[in-house]
């Protein structure tokens, strides 16, 4: 094996493939990447047995085809520190690989390619196309609400629900829930309701380059696969029962108020400055055409921010929220004006504004109710 390739292109390949490689893998060989050179293409592959990826790097003339298994993080570090436009890889006698960059040379120990686990092939027979921009939107507007605690199982991913000509992605951590809906061309009448792991969503977004107008997705009973021009990714799906998101989203709200999105974000951020980790809540009081946000911390002081709510003359409503949850949901929206719906003080708020987007946030119970 001997080839010369763009340093930046192969560095990107190692960085993306490195997202699925654990430095503490149960099998030492899994800390490596598998490089295969054939014709005018370099394929860099990696897996942790839960997720796998093939990343393709187009090249010019290849001096010698072949394959090698090299340490992922070490090669990525070398490529990052080199300054040349191109680098050369060459397999040597004794199971070693030499990497050259200008006047710098590095000799790397190589593993036996035959011992590297096979990487799943993309299944075109069970695949459907999805507009790249719409998939990016589905991920970016929901991924933030996936549960971070590993013990939440079914909450550790976002549900991809495909029915008719709509694709929707839903994420929740039990304290808030977000849903984004996109219209799609589902001429193959694919129907699905799978939970995609959080880490897979991160990797999907990394490989969705601008060169792809359309991406291919294949769904099996326990696996999802994504195919773009430069990469193919497979990931096991999250097992478990996802909550009934339709029952969580309020159909109607007794009070619906409009806020300037930027002003609402700024008000919550300001109030959050005088909260503590123990009392991470901001009170929202609606009365006489005003919205008052307040917070206090025994060791810091208190904050009070006022916003206008023209036209509201109903009963006074007091409700408290985790400011981080409110800001995270509002930040992914694009609408200048958002609608916040309330039912009662102990019921969740429903935030809308972007087409096909709904964000539901549970209130926080404060000491004095």
Image (spheres, rainbow, N blue to C red):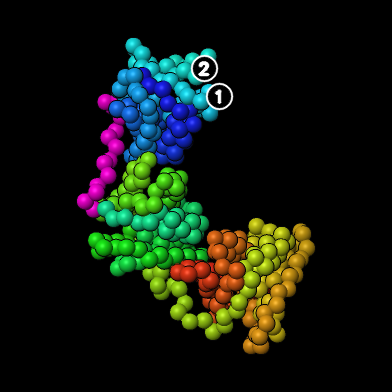
Q: Position of residue 232 (x, y in %)?
A: 34, 43
Predominant SS along the magenta part? loop
Task: Using the rendered image of the protein, determine whether residue 33 is visible from the camera's viewpoint.
Answer: yes
* Among the two numbered marks 1 and 2 on one chain, the one whose residue lies closer to the N terminus: 1
Name above or below for residue 18 compared with residue 99. Answer: below
| Residue 251 point in image, percent of width and height | 45, 79
Element at badge 2? loop
Which residue is tagged 2? 102
The residue at the far right in this view is 301
- Answer whether residue 123 is magenta in the image: yes
Circle count: 2
Q: Which residue is mark 1?
A: 83
Coordinates of residue 124 in the picture (x, y in percent): 24, 49
Residue 34 seen in the current view: no
Horizontal side of 184 relative to 255 (left or right) equals left
Please name whichever residue, 295 or 352, is drawn nearer the observer in this view of the structure: 352
Query: What's the distance in space between the residues labelled 1 and 2, CA to CA?
Result: 8 Å
Q: What are the residue bounds of the magenta stretch?
A: 109-126
At horizontal 34% and vertical 11% (from top left) the residue drawn is 93
């Amino acid at each position: 094996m001997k080839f010369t390739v763009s340093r930046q292109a192969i560095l990107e390949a190692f960085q993306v493939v490195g997202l699925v490689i654990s430095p503490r893998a149960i099998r030492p060989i899994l800390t490596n990447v598998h490089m295969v050179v054939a014709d005018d293409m370099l394929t860099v592959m990696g897996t942790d047995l839960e997720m796998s990826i093939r990343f393709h790097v187009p090249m010019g003339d290849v001096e010698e085809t072949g394959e090698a298994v090299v340490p992922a993080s070490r090669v990525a570090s070398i490529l990052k520190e080199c300054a040349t436009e191109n680098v050369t890889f060459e397999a040597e006698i004794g199971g070693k690989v030499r990497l050259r960059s200008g006047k710098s040379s590095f000799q790397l120990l190589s593993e036996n390619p035959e011992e590297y686990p096979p990487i799943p092939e993309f299944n075109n027979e069970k695949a459907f196309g999805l507009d790249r921009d719409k998939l990016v939107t589905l991920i970016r507007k929901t991924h933030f609400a996936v549960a971070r605690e590993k013990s939440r199982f079914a909450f550790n991913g976002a549900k991809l629900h495909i029915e008719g000509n709509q694709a929707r992605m839903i994420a929740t951590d039990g304290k808030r829930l977000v849903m984004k809906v996109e219209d799609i061309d589902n001429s193959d009448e694919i129907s699905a309701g799978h939970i995609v792991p959080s880490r897979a969503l991160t990797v999907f977004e990394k490989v969705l380059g601008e060169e792809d107008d359309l991406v291919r997705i294949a769904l099996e009973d326990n696996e999802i696969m994504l195919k773009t021009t430069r990469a193919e990714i497979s990931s096991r799906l999250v097992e478990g029962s996802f909550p009934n998101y339709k029952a969580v989203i309020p159909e109607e709200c007794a009070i619906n108020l409009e806020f300037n999105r930027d002003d609402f974000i700024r008000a919550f951020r300001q109030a959050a400055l005088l909260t503590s980790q123990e009392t991470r809540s901001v009170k929202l009081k609606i009365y006489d055409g005003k919205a008052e946000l307040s917070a206090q911390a025994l060791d810091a002081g208190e904050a009070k921010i006022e916003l206008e709510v023209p036209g509201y003359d109903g009963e006074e409503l007091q409700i408290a929220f985790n400011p981080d949850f409110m800001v995270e949901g509002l930040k992914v929206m694009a609408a200048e004006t958002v609608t916040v719906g309330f039912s009662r003080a102990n019921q969740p708020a429903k935030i809308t504004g972007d087409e096909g987007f709904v964000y539901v946030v549970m209130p926080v119970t404060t000491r004095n109710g």
